[in-house]
Image: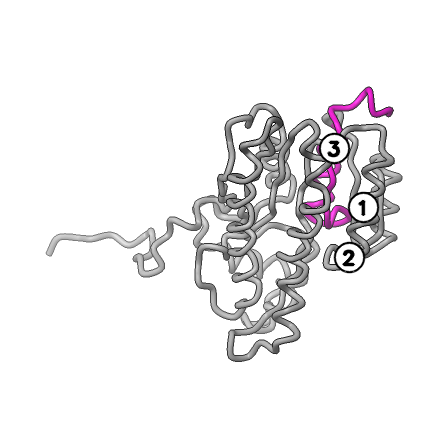
């Protein structure tokens, strides 16, 4: 597919797995050229064979690797129209229990990497305008226990998106920037979290662990990665042309549950 036949080029970080891979499949189906980057070359290669996407192996926390992504974008025939920051890592630990090196590593991938790649790609995005979507988390606006570095990194990512929405939305060719904040979503990273959590929840397997952590979700299940990908693709499209600086929760309504609420089957009976 030549650059003239596409809707433009979208860069997807963390594009080889999870939500990033679902976004890549969906965007290719909708006629975009897609360039994915990630650390696991075999995953990138497999998705390239499946979808025809472009690949650049690299770590978003590395400015040098990000520069190689930028160079690949320059070589593409398709004009750059968007960036999806789906790369991210999780580290368990409270503030007191998190080592400084772990804290710095999580922020370097989840926040600084997104900042650096965006900064390097902005000159090309400004040529025609476009959209940036950050993959955040519902942890960004809560105070979850035991994932301090991750939660803070996602909150910082929301702030970065808001700043970009203001700074880049004013140009001759505006660049919109928004965030999607998923709750528990089936992915390789979430599967691993379920495997780790299972022994602490009575020896549950992965499926039972998903059921346990989503038992208060009104929709009663975790999200599928394609459900999050659909929201991201919409934010990239012209259908969302006036959506800028938004944070969209994709959590099945979980954020509205009162932690102190009574069980839903509780009935108040008159004496």
Q: Is residue 49 left or right of residue 116?
A: right
The quarter of the picture where residue 236 lies is: top right
Q: Which mark is residue 238?
A: none
N-terminal of the two: label 1 or label 3? 1
Q: Is residue 253 left or right of residue 223?
A: left
Residue, x 51% and y 51% (percent of image)?
159
Q: Nearer the viewer, residue 201 or 256?
A: 256
State the residue position of label 1.
69
C-alpha distance separating marks 1 and 2: 10 Å
Q: Position of residue 221 (x, y in %)?
A: 53, 48
Q: Are marks 1 and 2 in contact (CB under 8 Å)?
A: no
Q: Position of residue 18 (x, y in %)?
A: 70, 49
Q: How is the image coloured?
A: one colour
Between circles 1 and 2, the one closer to the viewer is 1
Magenta stretch, residue numbers: 1-29
Q: Are marks 1 and 3 in contact (CB under 8 Å)?
A: no
* Mark 1 crowd level (few <14, some 14–19, many ≥20, 10 Å Cα): many
N-terminal of the two: label 3 or label 2? 2
Q: Is residue 230 visible?
A: yes
The quarter of the picture where residue 88 lies is: bottom right
State the residue position of label 2.
59
* Mark 2 crowd level (few <14, some 14–19, many ≥20, 10 Å Cα): some
Q: Position of residue 137 (x, y in %)?
A: 54, 52
Q: Nearer the viewer, residue 216 or 113?
A: 113
Q: Position of residue 179 (x, y in %)?
A: 55, 43
Residue, x 55% and y 56% (percent of image)?
154
Whether 1 is drawn above or below 163: the answer is above
Between circles 3 and 2, the one closer to the viewer is 3
State the residue position of label 3.
80
């Amino acid at each position: 597919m030549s650059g003239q036949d596409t809707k433009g080029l979208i860069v997807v970080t963390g594009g080889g797995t999870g939500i990033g891979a679902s976004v890549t499949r969906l965007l290719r189906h909708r006629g975009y050229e897609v360039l994915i980057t990630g650390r696991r070359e075999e995953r990138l290669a497999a998705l390239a064979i499946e979808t025809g996407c472009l690949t650049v192996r690299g770590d978003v926390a590395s400015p040098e690797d990000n520069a190689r992504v930028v160079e690949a974008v320059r070589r593409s025939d398709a004009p750059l129209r968007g960036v999806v920051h789906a790369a991210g890592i999780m580290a368990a630990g409270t503030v007191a229990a998190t080592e400084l090196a772990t804290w710095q590593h999580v922020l370097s991938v989840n926040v600084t990497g997104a900042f650096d790649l965006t900064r390097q790609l902005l000159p090309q995005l400004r040529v025609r305008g476009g959209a940036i979507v950050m993959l955040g988390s519902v942890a960004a606006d809560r105070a979850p226990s035991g994932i301090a570095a991750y939660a803070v990194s996602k909150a910082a990512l929301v702030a970065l998106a808001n700043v970009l929405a203001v700074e880049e939305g004013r140009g001759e060719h505006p660049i919109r920037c928004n965030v999607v904040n998923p709750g528990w979503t089936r992915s390789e990273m979430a599967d691993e979290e379920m495997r780790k959590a299972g022994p602490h929840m009575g020896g549950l397997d992965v499926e039972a662990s998903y059921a346990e952590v989503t038992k208060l979700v009104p929709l009663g299940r975790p999200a599928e990665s394609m459900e999050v990908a659909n929201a991201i693709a919409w934010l990239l499209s012209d259908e969302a042309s006036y959506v800028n600086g938004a944070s969209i929760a994709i959590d099945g309504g979980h954020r509205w549950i009162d932690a102190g609420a009574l069980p839903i089957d509780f009935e108040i009976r008159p004496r």
